[in-house]
Image (spheres, rainbow, N blue to C red):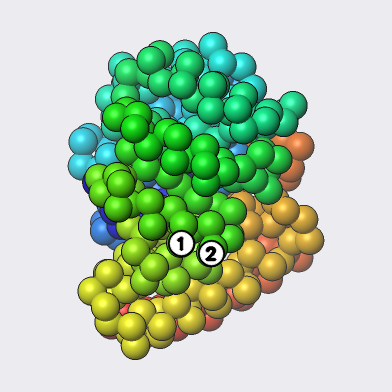
Amino acid sequence: MTSGIIPPLITPLKDRDTLDRDGLERLIERLVTGGVHGLFIIGTTGEGPSLSYRLRRELITETCKLVRNRLPVFVGITDTAFVESVNIAKHSADAGATALVAAPPYYLPEGQPELLEYIRHLLPELPLPFYLYNMPSLTKVSFDIDTVRALQDEPKIHGIKDSSGNMVYFHRLCQMLKERPDWSVLMGPEELLLDAVLAGGHGGVNGGANVFPQLYVALYNAAAAGNVQRARQLHALVMHVSSTLYQVGRHSSAIIKGIKCALSHLGVCDDFMAEPFHRFRDQERARIADALAVLQEEITTALA
């Protein structure tokens, strides 16, 4: 069973098709030192759909090399082309990844019977364990509870990451653990990490852990141990991260821009964004720098 904090890695870029390898190494070492429990690459926070297939392969290879088996590596294979998902899956296995993750194909919305058939066709082609990824705000299609229930008997599926933000849905996923206790149910939005763990979930795939890994690990540990008072204190800091770093931009890309900008201020990696997006400009960068300074002081004090 997978549990804990599994940051969805940002993808450090030098330009539209060049990996910032040195930045990737610094980021991975930051997260390993921060005590995270795994890494998820080529997801939403990693700008996965905007990366060329060549760059995705390079990122998978380099990440697995740099991790050196110290942490499990989860690779996003979400794509509109079935064959490309399978190709990335096979490359991931060859590179030494641990597991694969896929959301529903995101262009022409599929019905639930079609989605169920798609997953059942995909599974025999996959060389690694597999996790469902529920991201309806971006894919336009959710893994309905009945669809998840129909897939519970598939031994290759090891769990689900839910980024719907719907806690009723999440509670229903946790109820289903009675039938599949070896499954992992993981929360995407970090603002709901505390609620998710207290509801019986197994941890989070939270973007802010790229910047403050120790904070998210401490929150998870406190919640998992039932130390609710400590967990609420740390949750308040996570909410402060959300309300500052993620609110500088006006568009849905603001979260990724905020994380990348913060990491660039910390000297971790370049903050180049894959097109059609662009990095924050000077005025926005200054706001991130101010927010980061306050957050660093607050989090350092809380974790001391």
Residue farthest bottom in this picture:
229
Residue 201 is marked as none
- The percent coordinates of residue 244 (x first, y second) are 62, 73
- CB under 8 Å between discs 2 and 1: yes
Q: Is residue 303 visible?
A: yes
Instruction: State the image coordinates of residue 230 (x, y, percent, origin top left).
Output: 33, 84
Pointer 2: what residue?
167
**Three-letter amino acid code of the residue under disc 2:** Met
Q: Position of residue 50 (x, y in %)?
A: 65, 31
* Viewer-closest of 190 and 1: 1
Which residue is the site of mark 1? 171
Q: Give the residue drawn at x 41%, y 83%.
A: 232
Side (left or right) of 263 relative to 157: right
Residue type, mark 1 in image:
His
User: In the rendered image of this protein, does residue 254 appear above or below residue 240?
Assistant: above
Is residue 24 in view? no
